[in-house]
Amino acid sequence: MDHAFFEQLSQLARQAIADALAAGLTAESKDPAGFDPVTEADRAAERAMRSAIEQHFPDHGIWGEEYGMVRPDARFRWSLDPVDGTRALVCGLASWAVLVGLLDQGAHVAGMIDLPTLDDRLISVDRRTSRNGSPVAASACHSIADARWSTTDPFLFDRVEAEAVARVRGAAKVARYGLDAMAYARVATGDLDLVIESKLQPHDIDALVAVVRGAGGHFGDWERGSDFTRGRVIAASTKQLYEETVALLAG
């Protein structure tokens, strides 16, 4: 796998989203009990990327947020979140992203965080992450006291999680909210040091792992492992910062 195919997926998704925006965007909710928005931009971008993957890699599996799974037993599986941060998109904010992950027998081997509004594309292949073609590196921050940390929405944590995260917030130097996948991109570029989140789905996570790790950062769960089935993730600039964060969350 090389950068060129990820760049092709980026261009296809960007064009599909731009066309949907030009036609006028209407958000529907996938959750009758709340507001979980989806738009034609989400669907069109996923269709465009799926078509390209089917053409180039017909034996690969695909798991997308909008159109589900095909070939679940394939060795290689693509994970697609065509618009991560649809709430940001419909609010005219820049933090939404196109996320693409590639897994080899469940291992995260490549990924892309594409921020079209900013023309900012991070791609990780061969365990190296680049930003618009130039290598990037996570910061050397190893202490919570020096850390710039983020979470997309602090109100998504349950009570116990919120109490744990409050310990990190009280110890960290800077906190920023509402960044969606942009926060993980900024860990990879060295501008943020730490992201903590919960209740994420696989399509939210799969692209992020390779991008953060390929920049030298650490990506794990809340229990010093790599079990993301509970959707609880930590992206940290260094292993030492990750370990300190886990200890604070555990109390």
Image: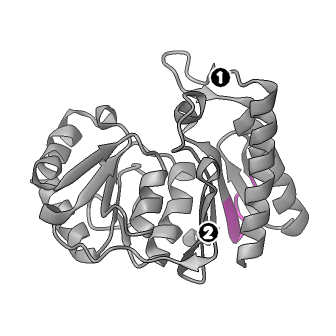
Is 234 rendered above or below residue 33?
Answer: below
At which x and y percent is residue 164? Answer: 16, 46
Q: Is residue 71 magenta?
A: yes
The amino acid type, in three-letter code, at marker 2 is: Leu
Residue picked out by circle 1:
27
Is 30 rendered above or below residue 136?
Answer: above
Determine whether, in the image, residue 185 is placed left or right of residue 170.
right
Q: Is residue 183 magenta?
A: no
Quick one: label 1, few (<14), some, or many (20+) residues within 10 Å?
some
The quadrant of the picture occupied by the N terminus is bottom right
Determine whether, in the image, residue 113 is placed left or right of residue 144.
right
Query: Which residue: 78% across, 57% down?
Result: 11
At which x and y percent is residue 170? Answer: 11, 48
Residue picked out by circle 2:
103
Question: Which of the 4 image quarters holds residue 132?
Answer: bottom right
The amino acid type, in three-letter code, at marker 1 is: Ala
At which x and y percent is residue 63? Answer: 68, 52
Residue 115 tag number? none
**Does label 1 or label 2 sit earlier along the sequence?**
1
Question: Which of the 4 image quarters holds residue 152?
Answer: top left
Which residue is outermost to the top? 33
Q: Secondary structure at mark 2?
A: strand
Is 101 rendered above or below residue 39?
Answer: below
What segment carries the magenta color? 70-78
Which residue is outermost to the right? 55
Query: Which residue: 20% across, 73% down?
Result: 142
Query: Which residue: 25% across, 68% down?
Result: 242
Nearest the eye: 225 or 14 = 14
- Asked if the residues shown at circle 1 and circle 2 are in contact, with their CB atoms under 8 angstroms apart, the answer is no
Query: Which residue: 21% across, 39% down?
Result: 162
The CA span between labels 1 and 2 is 30 Å
